[in-house]
Structure formats: C-alpha cells, structure tokens
Image (cartoon, rainbow, N blue to C red):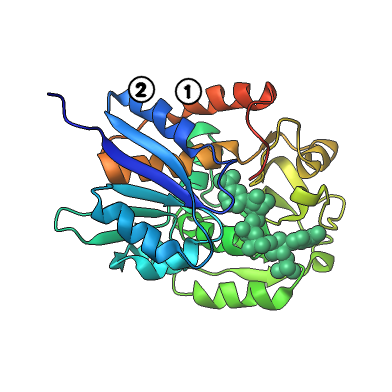
Amino acid sequence: MAADPDRYAVFGNPVVHSKSPQIHQWFARQTGQDISYSKQLVEEGQFESAAARFFRSGGKGLNITMPFKLNAFTFADRVTPRAERAGAVNTLARQGDGSILGDNTDGAGMVADITANLGWPLDARRVLVLGAGGAVRGVLQPLLSEGPGRLLIANRTVAKALQLARNFRDLGRIQVCGFEDLAGQQFDLVINGTAASLAGDLPPLPEGLLGDGACCYDMMYAAEPTVFLRWAREQGAQACADGLGMLVGQAAESFFLWRGVRPDTAAVIKLLRQALCRGQVPPVG
Ligand SMILES: NC(=O)c1ccc[n+]([C@@H]2O[C@H](COP(=O)([O-])OP(=O)(O)OC[C@H]3O[C@@H](n4cnc5c(N)ncnc54)[C@H](OP(=O)(O)O)[C@@H]3O)[C@@H](O)[C@H]2O)c1
C-alpha cells in the first residue's frame, strides 16, 4: 500500500485568499514530490494549540501568514539566523528529532526574484527602500548580503526606520530619512515596501529620484500595475516588477527547507500571473 503523502499547510486569519496551496502543488508536480498542502483558518489565540496538534498528528511543515508570524516565532524550538533578524517566522519545519525549526523566507524570496528572475544586480547599486514595517525588516539581511553601494530607508515615521538601521548595523550601513528628504537624491533601485499601494496611495516621492537605467519593485502585486509602478513608468524607470515573484520566491525557499529541492520559480510565477490576470487569484501582497 502506498504511504500517505507528507502533510503541509498554511495557517492564517483570514486564509481563504492564500495562494500557497496552489503554489506548493505546482512545485510538487514540477519536482515529483508527493505532498498534500491545505489551508487552515486559525482563530486568534488558538495558534499554539492548532500548530501543536498539526505537528503531533504527523504534519511536516507549516507556512504562517498574518497575523501569526510572531506567534510562530515563539512557538519554534529554535529559529534560523535570518528569522531571528526578521523577528518573525513564516515557515515551520519538523526536524528529524521532532523539534520545530522556524525560518523566515520572505526576504530571500524577494532578493532571489530581483537577482535571479529579473536579473537586476544589487552589488554596488544605490538602493532606496520605502517603508519600515514587517516586510522591510524581513528583507534587510538578504539585501545587505548582496553588497549594495548604498542602502537608504525612507519612511513616514522616521523613528521606525532609525530603529531598523540600529538593529542591522552590524551587517552594514543603513541610512534613514523621511520622504521629504529625498529631493535631489538618485537611486538605481527603488523598492516599495509600504502598505500605501494597498489603499491605492503613493508615498510623496520627488521628481528625478530615478537614476539612468533605474529599476522599481513593488512588494505588493496586482493584476494591473500598482500605483507605485505606474509612477515608476512615468518617471522613466527602465524596468518594473511587482511582488508576485516575491510571493513565489518565499514559497520556494520554504519548499527547499522542507523537501531539499529547489523548484523552478519562473514557471510558477508565469502560471500564477495568468491566473491573476484571469481574475482567479485575488490581488494582495
Ligand atoms: N509579495 C509578498 O510576498 C509580500 C510579503 C509581505 C508583504 N508584502 C507587501 O508589503 C507591504 C508592506 O507590508 P508590511 O507587512 O510591512 O506592513 P506593515 O508592517 O503594516 O508596514 C507598513 C509600512 O507602510 C507604511 N505606510 C502605510 N501607509 C502609508 C502611506 N499611505 N504612505 C506612506 N507610507 C505608508 C508604514 O509607515 P509608518 O511606519 O509611518 O506607519 C510602514 O512603514 C504591503 O503592500 C504588503 O502587501 C508583500
């Protein structure tokens, strides 16, 4: 009799919108892995008991989405250095000894999308990151490890950007400022990590921010270009991309942690983009 497939799931609230089951089934098919992957709505205050039950019953791994990334951080028996830096866990993996490892794959997913899928170099480039929330915190370590020439965080609340710069100062220099201080500066890559796009808003950005050949990346994704990416085109950006590749990239990192194989993300991004454009995938980021 064939063995049951290894079980994985995504926990969140809400979770109905999650594309993770679809993405991981595509990865599994592509790499010949026999897994099952479901989504589970978890009530607030119930994360620890639900996760413990999942692993006790033989589950191999979980993806964690809003609002449980901090719960998962404390639930894990130990966390990877990048999860420690991010202060949040989006992937739990049961180890051979039964202990639970916590990881954060969001940042690695975005950097892999930028460097490998899009082919945009980061080394020695002038990089501007807009926003200083959870998503930005998660991408700083992998960004710094690519050796940008300059890394500046601009945020509405400058104190939050300052705190991030302090937390990461042993890994590299991060400068900070408010949006009003950006006038007269130029960058090779601008990454929008604010939640402004979700409301169709644009942070107040000055003219002339993009240097020759500059690229722009929005962590949010949608069927149509986001307001930030429309602004980028108007400003003469050479290339633009939204965060669909980041979503698939973080999933690929989780899949690698669980299964030890790297799926082809470009093929899955293409499938997901087609589904998004047909209206089969709700836009978020
Ligand atoms: N593609 C993916 O896989 C992926 C994964 C994670 C997140 N994301 C996207 O990343 C973005 C940020 O998420 P998050 O979890 O970091 O959110 P968060 O922790 O709530 O942080 C939100 C950030 O956006 C800023 N902000 C909000 N509204 C703004 C506005 N109108 N103008 C300027 N700044 C504004 C906030 O500034 P203050 O500090 O001043 O409040 C803060 O820096 C969202 O668009 C999310 O969809 C994408």
Q: In this view, does 163 lie to the left or right of 38?
A: right
The residue lying toward the viewer, choosing from 231 and 222, is 222
Of tags 1 and 2, the one toward the viewer is 2
The crowding category of the residue bearing disc 2, from other C-alpha atoms within 10 Å (few below 14, some 14 to 19, many at least 20), is few
| Ligand 1 within 8 Å, label 1 CB | no
The residue lying toward the viewer, choosing from 208 and 102, is 102
SS for dot 1: helix
Q: Position of residue 197 (x, y in %)?
A: 76, 49
The quarter of the picture where residue 50 lies is bottom left
Amino acid type, callout 2: Gln
For disc 1, the marked residue is: 267
The residue lying toward the viewer, choosing from 239 and 24, is 24
The crowding category of the residue bearing disc 1, from other C-alpha atoms within 10 Å (few below 14, some 14 to 19, many at least 20), is few
Q: Position of residue 245 (x, y in %)?
A: 55, 36
Task: Find out whether the residues at labels 1 and 2 contact each other: C-beta distance under 8 Å.
Answer: yes
Name the quarter where the N terminus is drawn: top left
For disc 2, the marked residue is: 30
In the rendered image of this protein, does residue 166 appear above or below residue 80?
A: below
Cα distance, mark 1 to mark 2? 9 Å
| Ligand 1 within 8 Å, label 2 CB | no
Name the quarter where the C terminus is drawn: top right
Give me the residue at 80% from left, 64% from top. Answer: 179
Q: Is residue 133 left or right of residue 119?
A: right
Give me the residue at 41% from left, 34% from top. Answer: 24
Give me the residue at 40% from left, 44% from top. Answer: 9
Amino acid type, callout 1: Ala
